[in-house]
Image (cartoon, grey):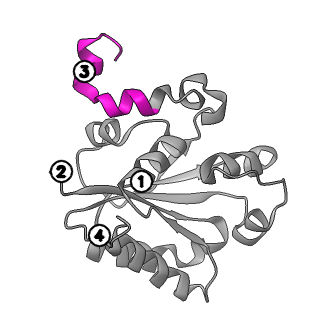
């Protein structure tokens, strides 16, 4: 993957899954789909995990949870080979696709899309428990059309390395430095 390419994330929440086939088909016309996972967060943890994901304090039964559903959802990890950015540094290809799909849902936020490289990295880590670099090592090929069940990792806010900022620091050093320091 070149520096200009970007690993991004789309989430199709439970109540949006009825359009998952046309959305994934459309995504594949603009992005390289690397992997599609089906994930389930236990109902009693859903609001807390949603709050972890969005970085907000959301109460159980919050509007987002009710609106999007708290059942199984799809995660599509994609590669944008030709990202274009606005002045704020957001990926225009991702933004346009995300808002197009939200239009398909009549304006409902049944889909999430990472807005920029940093958010994509955070999304991958918070959902899958690995960095984008580790993801790309584990899944070097394009998606084979099969949706893989994925067990949710421990909540990132329960991980002291993440909450203390250690993960962000280590990620900024780069994988090679971590290997050299025997931290990997």
Between tags 4 and 2, which lies in front?
A: 4
Secondary structure at numbered mark 4: loop
Q: Which residue is mark 4?
A: 85
Q: Which residues are magenta?
A: 168-184
Q: Please, what secondary structure does the residue beneath circle 2 have?
A: loop
Residue 168 figure quarter? top left
Q: Which mark is residue 3?
A: 2
- Residue 155 in sight from this viewpoint: no
Disc 1/disc 3 C-alpha distance (Å): 22 Å
Task: Tell me the CA gap for discs 4 and 2.
Answer: 14 Å
Characterize the local packing of mark 4: few (<14), some (14-19) or many (20 or more) Cα atoms within 10 angstroms: some
Does the magenta-highlighted stretch encompass residue 178?
yes
Do labels 4 and 3 touch, CB within 8 Å?
no
CB contact under 8 Å: marks 1 and 4: no
Residue at numbered disc 1: 120
Q: Neighbour class for label 1 at 10 Å: few (<14), some, many (≥20)?
A: many
Q: Does 128 sit left or right of 59 as displayed?
A: left
Assign a secondary structure to mark 3. Answer: helix
Residue 33 seen from this side: yes
The circle on residue 177 is 3
**Disc 1/disc 4 C-alpha distance (Å):** 14 Å
């Amino acid at each position: 993957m070149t520096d200009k390419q970007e690993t991004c994330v789309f989430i199709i929440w439970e109540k949006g899954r009825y359009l998952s086939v046309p959305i994934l088909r459309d995504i594949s016309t603009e992005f390289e789909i690397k992997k599609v996972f089906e994930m389930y967060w236990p109902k009693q943890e859903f609001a807390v995990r949603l709050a972890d994901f969005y970085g907000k304090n959301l109460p159980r039964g919050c509007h987002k949870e009710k609106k999007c559903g708290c059942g199984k959802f799809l995660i599509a990890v994609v590669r944008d080979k030709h990202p274009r950015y606005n002045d704020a540094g957001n990926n225009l290809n991702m933004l346009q696709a995300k808002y197009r799909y939200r239009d398909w849902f009549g304006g409902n936020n049944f889909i999430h899309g990472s807005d920029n490289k940093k958010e994509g990295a955070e999304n991958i880590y918070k959902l899958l428990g690995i960095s984008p670099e580790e993801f790309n090592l584990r899944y070097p090929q394009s998606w084979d059309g099969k949706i893989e069940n994925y067990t949710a990792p421990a909540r990132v806010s329960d991980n002291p390395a993440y909450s203390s900022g250690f993960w962000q620091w280590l990620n900024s050093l780069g994988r090679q430095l971590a290997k050299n320091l025997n931290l990997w």
